[in-house]
Image (cartoon, helix red, strand yellow):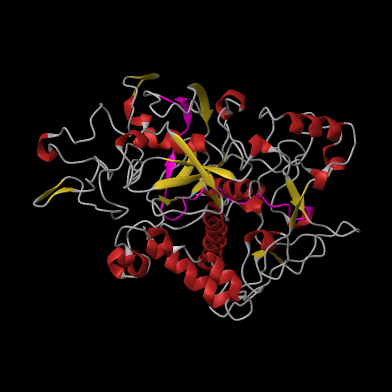
């Protein structure tokens, strides 16, 4: 009995002595108020956001894998690597966009109606001079028959605004779920939750609790959630061109060991666009235009069952679980278009479109308050911010190494310390825009085929471009999110 008692005392002593994890570099305890309560919060893996699936990254040959029948020569094959990331399993639907419009109207309409109107898709994209498309103008966005169809008439800028809005709504819901905030449908104008403003301490809102318990120096006993806690999710954004193309191929299903056993030209195996499985023999694998005047086939046996778009969960997903990565609608991606980007971009996470920014601060170095819409204010970095840097020299890198002579002169002037227009060479004669080319710094890439396209454009390596403020009846989008930490993660768990 005495031995058991002594063993119990020894166990209690061990538990008490080990109640705080100690730093491996200083020996001081974490989460101990005696030491200032520097906290190490429990963390396993990044949470998977709503509608997202994990795309495990890797290497692949980006670019053309079929004949360049358009003779664009803008998709030169090149091996690159993309990191793991998350992507929406479906395109953003009309109903998703209506949810967005409802929130925008509820928050901004009475004080800033233009904000709501700028978010409206252009429903007039359906009109044709010699076609009767008025039903789509009137009903496609709002009628429940089309609620699960992909939203169209959305510009690149509108799509990126949606991603920002979605980031804030998802993170606000996480804070509500964790019991830190109350549901607050009465937010209005600048009094709305913004993730970055919250992290900078510029948003209070309707708190349910004061915060996470914390006994740090001069602390009231609580603190707000920090990025170090791993509770809030990274930003939603458009996928880069490399990410979209990699996800569309779904080569994870074609890998044996470290070998890709069959190089795909579509998001599925083989050269055909019909299902070869006996049970579904002959059924179309995507929604596209089979030929002139043939949008859906013959009555009684419609080949793709879609005269225009189809529901976002229609057809079989690829090996990543992503739906409609070929056909239905083409999709905006993050990149600025250049014909020879593949020759110039990095082979790790390639992307063209960087404009490096910083949070706006006053002359005393204090972070400026939010703007009238409740968002943080950012400005491009200045020349002094890049002084003595080797990895970048200026804020504006969209047209870096694009072959434009005036850009090279401006870059040299910038590095020598001379001022240039507005701190960036954006307004200089890029590709003689409007005279011999439609390419400038506002030309954005869109990928994949659509209901209005022939099968050629469904190959993920094809690429096209459109002005970031323009929209069509065949371009939609889906969101992506960075994967932080290990490349494999926990998937949907």
x and y, in percent, of residue 38 in the image: 73, 52
Nearer to me, 86 or 144: 144
Residue at the image point whose x is 69% and y is 68% from the top: 203
So how many labels did they put on this image?
A: 0
Left/right of residue 385 with respect to residue 248 in the rendered view: right
Nearer to me, 87 or 269: 269
Q: Main secondary structure of the magenta part?
A: loop
Residue at the image point whose x is 24% and y is 34% from the top: 273
x and y, in percent, of residue 473 in the image: 39, 54
Q: Quadrant of residue 419?
A: top right
Q: Quadrant of residue 92?
A: bottom left
Left/right of residue 475 with respect to residue 350 in the rendered view: left
Nearer to me, 162 or 296: 296
Residue at the image point whose x is 48% and y is 73% from the top: 102
x and y, in percent, of residue 111 in the image: 64, 79
The residue segment tinted magenta is 35-64
Assess whether residue 246 is covered by the magenta stretch. no
| Picture layout, residue 436 above or below residue 474 | above
Q: Quadrant of residue 14?
A: top right
In this view, the residue farthest toward the left is 300
Assess whether residue 42 is covered by the magenta stretch. yes
x and y, in percent, of residue 308 in the image: 29, 54
Q: Is residue 414 visible?
A: yes
| Picture layout, residue 148 above or below residue 76 | below
Residue at the image point whose x is 40% and y is 40% from the top: 448
Q: Is residue 391 visible?
A: no
């Amino acid at each position: 009995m005495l031995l058991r008692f002594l063993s119990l005392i020894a166990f209690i002593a061990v538990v008490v002595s080990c109640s705080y994890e100690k730093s491996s570099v200083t020996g001081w305890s974490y989460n101990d108020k005696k030491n200032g309560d520097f906290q190490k919060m429990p963390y396993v893996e990044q949470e998977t956001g709503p509608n997202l699936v994990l795309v495990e990254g890797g290497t692949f040959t980006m670019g053309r894998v079929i004949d360049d029948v358009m003779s664009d020569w803008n998709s030169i094959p090149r091996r690159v690597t993309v990191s793991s990331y998350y992507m929406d399993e479906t395109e953003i639907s009309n109903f998703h966009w209506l949810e967005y419009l409802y929130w925008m109207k509820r928050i901004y309409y009475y004080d800033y109606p233009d904000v709501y109107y700028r978010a409206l898709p252009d429903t007039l994209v359906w009109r044709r001079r010699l076609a009767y498309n008025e039903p789509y103008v009137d009903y496609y966005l709002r009628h429940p028959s089309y609620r699960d169809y992909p939203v169209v008439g959305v510009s690149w800028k509108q799509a990126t605004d949606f991603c920002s809005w979605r980031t804030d709504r998802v993170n606000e819901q996480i804070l509500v779920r964790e019991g830190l905030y109350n549901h607050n449908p009465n937010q209005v104008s600048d009094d709305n939750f913004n993730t970055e403003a919250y992290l900078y301490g510029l948003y209070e809102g309707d708190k349910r609790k004061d915060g996470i318990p914390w006994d740090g120096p001069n602390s009231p006993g609580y603190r707000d959630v920090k990025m170090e806690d791993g509770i809030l999710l990274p930003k939603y954004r458009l996928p880069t061109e490399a990410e979209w193309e990699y996800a569309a191929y779904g080569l994870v299903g074609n890998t044996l060991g470290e070998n890709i056993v069959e190089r795909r030209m579509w998001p599925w195996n083989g050269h055909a666009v019909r299902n070869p499985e006996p049970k579904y023999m002959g059924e179309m694998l995507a929604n596209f235009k089979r030929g002139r005047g043939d949008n859906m086939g013959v009555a009684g046996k419609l080949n793709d069952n879609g005269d225009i778009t189809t529901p976002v969960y229609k057809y079989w997903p690829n090996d990543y679980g992503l739906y409609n990565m070929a056909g239905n609608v083409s999709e905006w991606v993050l990149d600025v278009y250049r014909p020879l980007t593949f020759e110039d971009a990095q082979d790790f996470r390639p992307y063209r479109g960087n404009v490096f920014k910083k949070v706006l601060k006053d002359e005393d170095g204090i972070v400026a308050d939010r703007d009238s819409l409740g968002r943080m204010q950012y400005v491009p970095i200045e020349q002094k911010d890049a002084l003595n840097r080797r990895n970048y020299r200026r804020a504006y890198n969209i047209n870096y190494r694009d072959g434009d002579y005036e850009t090279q002169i401006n870059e040299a002037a910038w590095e020598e310390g001379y001022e240039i227009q507005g701190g960036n060479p954006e307004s200089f004669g890029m590709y003689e825009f409007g005279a011999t080319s439609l390419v400038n710094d506002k030309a954005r890439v869109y990928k994949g085929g659509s209901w209005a396209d022939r099968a050629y454009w469904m190959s993920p390596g094809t690429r096209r471009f459109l002005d970031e403020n323009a929209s069509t009846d065949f371009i939609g989008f889906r969101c992506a999110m960075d994967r932080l930490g290990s490349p494999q993660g926990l998937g949907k768990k």
